[in-house]
Image (cartoon, rainbow, N blue to C red):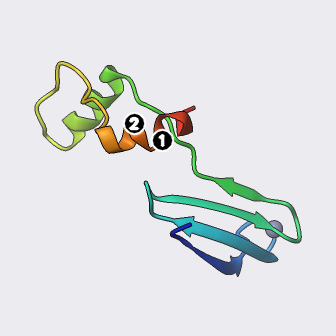
Amino acid sequence: MSGCSYDTVCSRCGGKMICYSDWKPFDAVTGICLDCGFRINTVTQLASLKEVNEERELFELEPVKSLKQPTQGWIKGGYEEYLE
Ligand SMILES: [Zn+2]
């Protein structure tokens, strides 16, 4: 585990929310409100080539012809399994 736990105020009910934030191997936050049950989970997905190029256009970047492959470290770490 490389992250940290923290308490915060629930946006939904104003109750007590327990969260855990991690930054390895990528930024992710999970949390649950101990009063109303509101739950947060970072969703990890792989966008399509079309979606990536639409996003690049917003930043005035040239479109790419294919999506970059993951690093060996990513593959060896088994992180591809995090993708939904
Ligand atoms: Zn709540």
Q: Is residue 45 shown left or right of residue 49?
A: right
| Closer-to-camera residue (49/23) | 23
**Callout 1 environment at 10 Å: few (<14), some (14 to 19), or many (20+)?**
few
> Based on the displayed image, in which of its 4 quarters is residue 29 positioned?
bottom right
Q: Which mark is residue 75?
A: 2
Residue under pointer 1: 79
For the N terminus, give its image quadrant: bottom right
Assess disc 2: are there few (<14), some (14-19) or many (≥20) residues with their C-alpha within 10 Å of its C-alpha.
few
Q: Which mark is residue 29?
A: none
Residue at x-position 70% and y-position 64%: 31
Give the side of residue 56 with respect to residue 73, left or right: left
Contact, CB < 8 Å: mark 1 with mark 2?
Answer: yes
Label 2's element? helix
Determine whether, in the image, residue 54 is placed left or right of residue 7.
left
Query: Farthest residue in the right direction?
Result: 35
Q: 70 above or below 66?
A: below
Residue at 82% x, 77% y is 15
SS assignment at label 1: helix
| Separation of residues labelled 1 and 2 (CA atoms) | 6 Å
Locate ligand 1 by image quadrant: bottom right
Q: Quadrant of residue 18?
A: bottom right
- Amino acid carrying mark 1 in the image: Tyr
The amino acid type found where label 2 is placed reads: Ile
Where is residue 20? Give x, y as percent: 63, 69
> Residue 12, image x and y in percent?
76, 65
Taking the image as shown, residue 55 lies to the left or right of residue 35, namely left
Residue 55: image quadrant is top left
- Residue furthest to the left: 62
